[in-house]
Image (cartoon, rainbow, N blue to C red):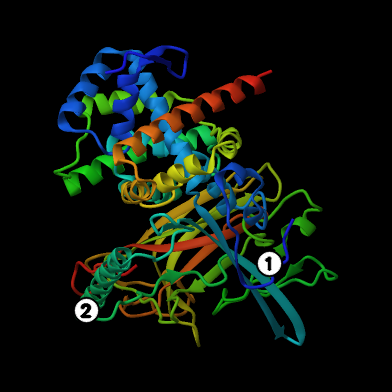
Amino acid sequence: MERELQNESEVVPTSLGRYLDERGLEALDEGDKVRRYTEFYLRTRPALKAYLYAFLAGNDAAIEDCIQETGLVVWNKWDESWDLDAFQKYAFVTGKYKALSWLKKHKPAKKVYLSPALVERLADKSSELERDARLDSLQQCMDQLSPQNREILEARYESEGSKALRNLAEKMERSVDAIYKQLERLRSSLKDCVSRKSKLQQP
Amino acid sequence: MSEELIESGEGVPVNVEVRELVDRLIDGRLSEEENRRLESILESDEAAMRYCAERMRFHAEMEELMSPVRVELMQKRHLVVETKKGLATVSKAVSNVVRVENPKFGSALELPPGLKTPKQVLGYMLWGGLALVVLVAVIVFLIQRGPVSSEPQLVFRNASFEDLEINENSPPFIYTVLDWQDYFQTSSVRVCDVRRATDGKKEAQDGQYAVIMEGGFLTQRLSYNDGEAFVARKGLRLKVSGWAMLEEAGKPAQLWISSRVVVSAYPSMSQVEPDVQKLEVESDAWERFEAILTLPSDSLMMKPSIFRRDATQSAVDISGLQLAVSIDNKSKVPMFIDNLKIEVLEDLQETGVEVKK
């Protein structure tokens, strides 16, 4: 179905949890190459990001750069006959080399990383995980959080991580370590919540 | 350090220390000592490794949910209205560009990829500049080399006898064999629409028409495709080929291929025939024939082989005279000829080595 566009260019905000019925992409035909690629790319991002954490944990900007560069490489190599699995496998291989290339180029001195052998094992383990995102369940779990806990998560994930958390700690008159500890507990609670919901949804 | 056990993703318990270390790794807060400790745990504990991978995955999902990418669709519609030959035509096209942006970092992926970053633009400019340099070098080379000569080719004109159309409502024959029989005429050779002439039993070898020879000859004075006359010279070797087919199986036909020079046509006929090749056509299906015609390499002073009885027979130097090829059906057996070709195999010409093909 082709939408009537009011302007020549229209901005459609999106969240990954709704990418399958994304109104923005519906403006394109189902067979449109750009649409198919974008869907695959969006569905691959969380798994690819997790995979790249093995190499670049703690450097979110570098991870984002690698994801986007991977996206370009995959676009150039992508065969439209690929299914999602083939797409993701190629993205993982490309992502790995992008991450190694980033490390070689930037030689981060102050960052602490796991040994290369361990990183390889961790990345392999990450690539074995179920690749379908559980974002709908996660959204429901987050909706149950208190405003204060929500604020901690927003500081960590929506802003410039550590700086925002320091500011928040100051505002809440708590130590930074205490905020991180709270963040750790929140992750665990949310993870448990998602696991419970996933089990309930299983037939 | 807490020894409280928590569940890993698959229900395998890992201790709180692992959880703390993994979260510190994710948040970029590991000290070197903690890093070594985590490495030591992950190397020996498969459950901890699994937990770490899942925790990273969960963290990635959290980030994607809390700081989602923004998909921006830019759609351009092109509508072109134009008039061609009095008819109005409308063409339309839609181009789409999807931009996936991560607002947190302000970076974006554009699909299909365009020229976005200065680095990319510089890369394309460098490649473009290199291509331009190569192009200029090639042009300079070609200019220095001089004009490229598209050498004229020796060809038979109307080689497949398709140049003159036979009216569908007329008999399937015409006696005009365009570009052939320059000096002479014969009623034994006609161009025919093969299918109509044979009631659909046979087809031309190439196109729709062929000649049918009930005796007689086909002759053509040779010239290059630019119209320049092809003249006799010492040491020439020509290859004449084509396709022949008997109208009916049975008695074979004698096909002679010869090179000729008409020394004089009036008042008395005089022709020199430097070479003749004698072939036999036996089949009522198309068969390919080929003949090599050679001119002497020592002297072209030759006696006419075709002349009036009362004319003198003194030798004539045929050098520089236009060469002709004659294809003769020396029997009375009707035979089709089609798709003729001629090529120069060897041409010593003046330098003794130059080959003009």
Q: Is residue B123 left or right of residue B164?
A: left
Is B58 placed left or right of B89 in the picture? left
Query: Which kind of residue does numbered mark 1 sit on?
Result: Val
> Which quadrant, please, contains the N terminus of chain B?
top left
Q: In this view, does B93 lie to the left or right of B226?
A: right
User: Which one is nearer the viewer's eye here, A81 or A178?
Assistant: A178
As rendered, which of B323 and A201 lies closer to the eye? A201
Three-letter residue code for mark 2: Val
Question: Which residue has dot 1 on it?
Answer: B191
As displayed, is residue B19 above or below residue A159? above
> Could you confirm whether marks 1 and 2 are on the same chain?
yes
Q: Could you say which quadrant of the image residue B25 lies in?
A: top left
Residue A142, image x, y percentages: 55, 37
Where residue A41 sits in the image (x, y, percent)?
Answer: 50, 45
**Tag 1 secondary structure:** strand
**In the rendered structure, the residue with mark 2 lies on which chain?**
B
| 1 or 2: mark nearer the eye | 2
**Viewer-proximal residue, A100 or B215?**
A100
Which residue carries the number 2 mark? B140
Secondary structure of residue under mark 2: helix
- Residue found 43% across the figure and 24% down from its top: A128
